[in-house]
Amino acid sequence: LTHWTEAGVRARRIAVDYASHSAHVEELKDELLDVLAPIEPQAGRIPVYSTVTGQVEDGSGFDAAYWFTNLRQTVEFETATRKLLADGYGVFVESSPHPVVSLGVQETIEDTEGAS
C-alpha cells in the first residue's frame, strides 16, 4: 500500500475477509452458489450494461452462477462504460456508500472523447 501510494497510485486498504475479483473467492464458491441458489432471474424492462459480460443484458441470466462470476472475475466496468457511451449515454450517477467508480468513469469519458 505504501509503495503504490508513494508511486502516485490511488490505493487504500479495505477491511474484508477475502479479496473480491480474485482466486480468493474460490474458497467461497460452494457456499455462495448454495446461498444464491434461490434467485430466480427474470428479464427486466430496463436493459443492464453488465460488468460481468461488458454487454447489454436483460437480466434473465442473472442466476447464482452469474453473481458468483460477478464476485470472482475481473470487473468489465470500463467495457460496460464504453458501451454506454457508444450507445449515446452521457450522464452517470454513482450511488454507493463508498463511491470509487466516478474517477474511472471520468477517465473513460475523457479517453473516449480524445479518441474521437
Image (cartoon, grey):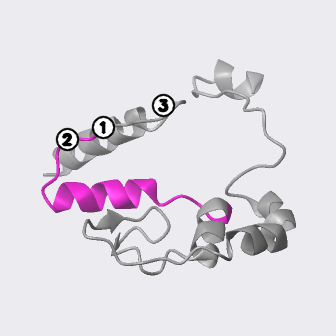
Three-letter code for the amino acid on which mark 3 is drawn? Pro
SS for callout 1: loop
In the picture as drawn, the residue positioned furthest to the top comes out as: 6
How far, Cα to Cα, is label 1 from label 2? Answer: 7 Å
- Could you tell me if the residues under marks 1 and 2 are in contact, i.e. CB atoms within 8 Å? yes
Q: Earlier in the sequence, mark 2 or mark 3?
A: 2
Residue 30 as seen in the image, left or right of residue 78: right
Q: Residues within 10 Å of mark 3 (few under 14, many from 20)?
A: few
Three-letter amino acid code at the position of disc 1: Val
Q: How many marks?
A: 3
Which span of residues is magenta-colored? Answer: 72-92
**Residue type, mark 2 in image:** Val
> As rendered, which of 77 and 96 lies closer to the eye?
96
User: Disc 3 to disc 1, how far (Cα)?
Assistant: 10 Å
> Does residue 27 appear left or right of residue 67 in this picture?
right
Image quarter in which the N terminus is found? top right
- Residue 111 shown in magenta: no
Say which mark, if any, is on residue 93. Answer: 1
Q: Residue at x 79, y 39 (%)?
A: 16
Residue 35 located left or right of residue 17 = left
Callout 2: helix, strand or loop?
loop
Give the x, y percent position of residue 110: 25, 39
Say which residue label 2 marks. Answer: 91
- Please give the residue where the numbered disc 3 appears in the rendered image: 99
Lower sequence index among marks 3 and 1: 1
